[in-house]
Amino acid sequence: MLTIENLYKSFGKLVAVNDFNLHVKEGETAVLMGPSGCGKSTMIRMINRLIEPDSGTICVSGTEVTKLDLEGLRRVRKRIGFVFQQFNLVGRLTAVENVMLGLVMDGIPRDAAYDKAMKALEKVGLEKRAQHKSAEMSGGQQQRVGIARALAFEPDLMLWDEPTASLDPILVREVLVIMEDLAKYRASSMLVVTHEISFAIHVADRIVLMDKGSIVEEGMPEDVFGHPASHIGQQYKELIE
Ligand code: ADP
Ligand code: MG
């Protein structure tokens, strides 16, 4: 589903992502963790080329993303859902209008877009809030609208970059519950960047630990957090104890 080989990215002298290799299978949820500044966002943004890699290859569902022209890239981006830390909703629009926006811009007729948007809002438990202005919703609900916006395209791959990082602690849980649901359902493969360690333990099929641009350890949660082989893994283990 997702294969990344020998991926590199530098900003000037700083090597942000250094020979990164990763394979995520169909329906699998991989959780990527590591200290701030270790290159997680740079890595995940290269998957749909929000950031251009210096070298390396990225394949999503058999398409080599790194080779695509703009038109091809536009097509493949529809199959990749991206949820960011910032929700980036249009506050004066309702929840359902926010979810419809991308669909309509993609040429889907309004009626069909509305139905798809409502279906996506159901998946995040917000069908009853569909007609509320997003600016009037809680942060947790806004992020759930953000998730619905990604799900509306029925993506093969969902990318998550710290989706709960800007939420009040009491609102984090409602977003994690949705993510856990999606992981269980296995409709998309998921790559999740998060510091939520208990989510990682319970939901990840695989943990990938990163430090200074490279993967330092990778495996099933019980192995990585139970018997860490890396310094970073050891630090996470101590956090759990
Ligand atoms: P993380 O998401 O793990 O916190 P980032 O991928 O955001 O890490 O950043 C990795 C490194 O690259 C950091 O040292 C950061 O300061 C640097 N960096 C990220 N984006 C840029 C940029 N556009 N220009 C220069 N340096 C950047
Ligand atoms: Mg980041």
Image (tube, helix red, strand yellow):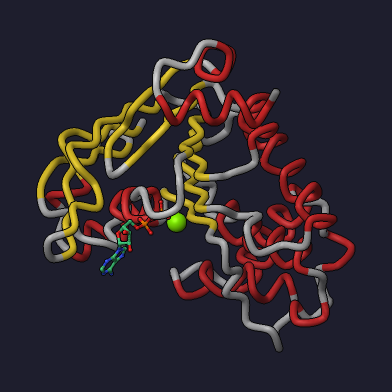
Residue 189 location in percent, x, y?
49, 33
Residue pictured at 12% horizontal, 61% vertical: 13
Q: Is residue 160 above or below residue 211?
A: below
Residue pictured at 57% horizontal, 74% vertical: 88
State the residue lying farthest toward the bottom: 92
Q: Is residue 232 left or right of residue 132?
A: left
Instruction: Please tell me in which quadrant of the rendered image residue 225 appears.
Output: top right
Residue 99 location in percent, x, y?
63, 67
Instruction: Please tell me in which quadrant of the rendered image residue 107 appears.
Output: bottom left
Nearest the camera: 167 or 226?
Answer: 226
Nearest the camera: 206 or 90?
Answer: 206
Q: Quadrant of the C terminus?
A: top right
Nearest the camera: 99 or 189?
Answer: 189
Residue pictured at 76% horizontal, 52% vertical: 172
Q: Quadrant of the N terminus?
A: top left
Residue 97 location in percent, x, y?
68, 76
Q: Is residue 185 visible?
A: no
Residue pictured at 72% horizontal, 35% vertical: 181
Q: Is residue 141 left or right of residue 162?
A: right
